Amino acid sequence: MENYSPGIRRIIYLLSLLIIRRVTSASLGGDITADTTLTLNGSAYVVSQDVVVAENATLTIEPGVNMHFKAGVLLQVKGSLQAKGTSRDRIVFSKVPTNTSANVDDLNVTEPYNDGMRLSDGKNYRVGRLEIFLNGQWGTVCRDRFDIKDAQVACRQLGFLGAKRFYTHGKGTGPTWLDEVDCKGIEESLLNCKHPGIGVENCAHWGDIGIECHTLHRKVFWRGIDFSSSKKPSSLQYVDVSQAYEAIKGSEYLPDLDHVTVKSCVYGVKSDNMSSPLTISDSSIRDNRDAGIQIKGSSKAITIENTVVDNTTDGDGLSYSEIAPDPVDFCSADVNVITFPITFQAFGKAWTNVDCAKVTE
Ligand SMILES: *[C@@H]1O[C@H](CO)[C@@H](O)[C@H](O)[C@H]1NC(C)=O
Ligand SMILES: *[C@@H]1O[C@H](CO)[C@@H](O)[C@H](O)[C@H]1NC(C)=O
Ligand SMILES: *[C@@H]1O[C@H](CO)[C@@H](O)[C@H](O)[C@H]1NC(C)=O
Ligand SMILES: *[C@@H]1O[C@H](CO)[C@@H](O)[C@H](O)[C@H]1NC(C)=O
Ligand SMILES: *[C@@H]1O[C@H](CO)[C@@H](O)[C@H](O)[C@H]1NC(C)=O
Ligand SMILES: *[C@@H]1O[C@H](CO)[C@@H](O)[C@H](O)[C@H]1NC(C)=O
Ligand SMILES: [Ca+2]
Ligand SMILES: [Ca+2]
């Protein structure tokens, strides 16, 4: 494009804007390979399977858009996420609103999660012989070609975050409903995976599959926004994230957060190998369980301004790296005399309620 005059370049730019896809349907999932805008008139979006923004793509979210994620579902950003709300029209990422027939975290997890699927004869509710209910009858699934991707789909269908393992359980009764199951791993239901047909099988009940699923206490979350393989800068402004497992997760890179709230998650803002600069400003990270802001890595350019980290119930509010010998109290630390790497052993255990906003420069 360097050889064109500014006028021509502008026309090319306008043409390129016209071909950018605008998504207005309310249901979302799968790979995003073209630049895509989620418009306010399509909101709220229900995200029922993982959304992966490809390396060369940008997902733009208009102010005021709400995205409701089903349990266990992830927004993975390999390219760029541009989520810029305004003070009046914030962008909201949360779990699908409470509905006992569609959500599992309001149910007693010792009961079956799902009308059409259960785990039987296991040590606890997370493990057992996989059984499905079809044509008025409970039946089993054969171990032939059953692998971890198939287990993943079944566990998510049951309402868990994912699968730990699969094994031969055996000793089932009734029909063997499925054999040779071949899932990609993103399907909503085992029945949506490739298989030769319901009841088409050459199995004996000793080959009934069993699975063990992951769970988080008695609460099931959506998985959060993952920038671990992010290749392009992203922006999060005036955004609210809640009820995610790992709300905002990165590896070497995390986007700057401006006027962002992260609430009622397991991990708030988390990065395991930070090497790029990060600024968190005018934000609130509260009521999370295992960590508020947890950053490991070598980046020395981390700025946290006018931000509250509060009521992290089972972990540290703010921690940087793990190799520092003495934890530092974030509230009283003189940031000019501490050297990197440091650990901010911040306020915010369950029984404290310190509202400590600190400005660092
Ligand atoms: C990204 O790459 C895919 C596959 O190469 C291509 O189909 C798609 O059009 C590209 N998207 C953009 C926004 O360049
Ligand atoms: C939403 O707005 C876009 C333009 O912003 C328009 O193309 C689309 O038709 C609208 N969709 C609905 C459902 O109104
Ligand atoms: C709950 O979910 C079911 C099935 O998805 C739906 O039919 C029903 O309208 C929902 N109820 C509410 C209050 O949203
Ligand atoms: C939940 O499960 C426990 C343990 O099995 C049981 O004692 C309790 O009655 C159940 N509660 C409901 C509301 O079903
Ligand atoms: C951490 O990041 C550095 C680059 O900043 C990279 O060389 C290294 O392999 C990464 N380590 C891990 C465990 O990913
Ligand atoms: C702290 O967080 C927990 C878990 O989200 C919540 O139940 C509790 O009400 C919060 N406490 C305060 C004082 O905000
Ligand atoms: Ca398989
Ligand atoms: Ca078979």
Image: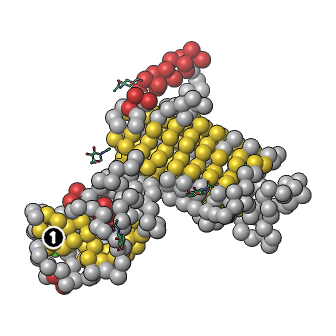
Q: Amino acid at mark 1?
A: Trp
Q: Residues within 10 Å of mark 1 (few under 14, many from 20)?
A: some
Comparing 317 with 350, the one in front is: 350
Q: The N terminus is located in which quarter?
A: top right
Residue drawn at x 40%, y 37% as measured from the top left: 44
Query: Compared with residue 210, is residue 24 higher up or lower down, i.e. above or below?
Result: above
Q: Quadrant of residue 334?
A: bottom right
Q: Residue furthest right?
A: 337
Where is residue 337? Give x, y as percent. 90, 58
| Residue that carries the numbered disc 1 in the rendered image | 138
Specify whether residue 166 is in view.
no
In the displayed structure, does residue 133 sit left or right of residue 110?
A: left
Where is residue 176? Give x, y as percent. 14, 73
Q: Quadrant of residue 330?
A: bottom right
In the displayed structure, does residue 217 sit left or right of residue 112?
A: right
Residue drawn at x 49%, y 20% as measured from the top left: 14
Residue drawn at x 85%, y 61% as measured from the top left: 339
Where is residue 223? Give x, y as percent. 47, 56
In the displayed structure, does residue 30 sit left or right of residue 315?
A: left
Residue drawn at x 72%, y 51% as measured from the top left: 355
